[in-house]
Image (spheres, grey):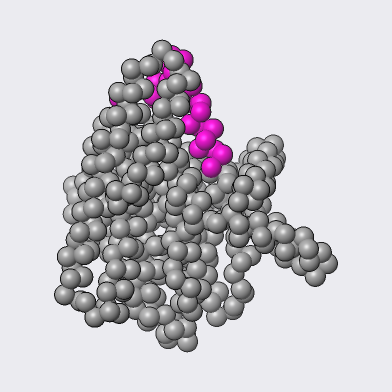
Amino acid sequence: MLQSFSIIFSIAALYSFINYKWLKLPATIALMIMSLITIIIISLSKSIVPDFYTFFCNIIINSDFKTLLLDGILSFLLFAGALHVNIEDIVKEKWSIILFASLGVLISTFIVGGLLFFVSNAIGVDIPFLDSLLFGALISPTDPIAVMAILKKANISKSLGIKIEGESLFNDGIGVVVFSGILIFAGMGEHGIESSIGSEIGKLFLEEAVGGLLYGTTLGFIGYYSINSVKENPQLCVMISLATVMSGYSMASLLHVSGPLAMVVAGMIIGNKLNIKSNTGPTRKLLNEIWEVLDDVFNGILFVLIGLAIHLLNYDPLHLTLGVITICIVLVARFISVLLPYSLLKHTEDSPIKTVSVLTWGGLRGGISVALALSLADNKSSEVILYITYVVVIFSIIVQGLSIGKLVKKLYPLKT
């Protein structure tokens, strides 16, 4: 696995260099595009240099995408993103973020799941209803990594940026809980134990979501006080922040609480208590520099992996057709799942539909959706779900990612 990780890291560094020197695209989009081009070239070499093709396939398989993301780099990326989020700004938009990250995910899950079930069976692809709901749960959360990387390039209002950023940071944890709840429902239903399904799902929510928030708060204050007590030693402060993430995320799985939610809360507390955004003093500067580097490194690895791993899918025109239809389903579900919660809130915008439109188009999907799709048991439905997940994710990152800035400029033209 170390060899595979090293090669993928080197590819990410090379592509980042090419993008910085010549392409000038948002990093996530550039890495995805170059990875897809690489896949085409390598696939064409299969008959010419079969050993190289096999070697490359083994690199991707040995990297173990699901484990690497969910049990590894996700913790660093979420912590790094949350480190610079202003809690006061989040509090101002708290009801928007809470509704989008919870009610919005649930609405989207059932809309996507229901529509996918009917459409897939209508065109001759057999996806059971619960499997359709599982797809709805894994594709509904917006990916904080993809969203935050693209937002850096989009000229949007502060309030709208906070809504998108806050939702994306929290809804992946909620999405994992919903995904796990449906898995419990499917497993217990198969064994005929329907009577305890509700209590098990409720227990899961309390343990994972509420437990994750409480655990993250505790972890954040422990990390802050530990760093603050040795703030005259910048290197030691960095070590403590790394230990907070690594040990904290590992303990979260042992405690059966949401590691992603814990990392977001811990990062926000440490970042705000230390006032890390001010970037003044040697400790704050070093923490900023190290975590920015880690953010760039793991972002690069993640999106290169997403692009390169697509060659493991078997081309099927029917599945591709379903994937294209699913893009429309996901966008419609996203629009409704944003519009309904947003209609429950008081807002000051002249045209709320513009905000809903940006939130819809800016809801990018990424590595979390792919990792959850890979975690499904190996059966006929899981192969189709992984296929359409990839279609939606690639469209989301490349097409939506490249055009969100233009959409914002069109809806919110700069006043002269």
- Residue found farthest to the right: 48
Q: Quadrant of residue 81?
A: top left
Q: Is residue 291 magenta?
A: yes
Image location of residue 145, percent across then percent down:
46, 46
Q: Is residue 77 magenta?
A: no
Please say if 209 is above or below 233.
Answer: below
Q: As rendered, which of 66 and 308 lies closer to the eye? A: 66
Q: What span is in magenta?
A: 272-298
Left or right? Give the position of 125 relative to 167.
right
Please say if 129 is above or below 388.
Answer: below
At 21% from the left edge and 64% from the top edge, which residue is drawn? 200
Please say if 94 is above or below 376.
Answer: above
Please say if 39 is above or below 231.
Answer: below
At 53% from the left edge and 56% from the top edge, which residue is drawn? 65
At 45% from the left edge and 41% from the top edge, which residue is drawn? 77
Left or right? Give the position of 366 relative to 92.
right
At 56% from the left edge and 39% from the top edge, which residue is drawn? 297
Image location of residue 90, percent across then percent down:
28, 38
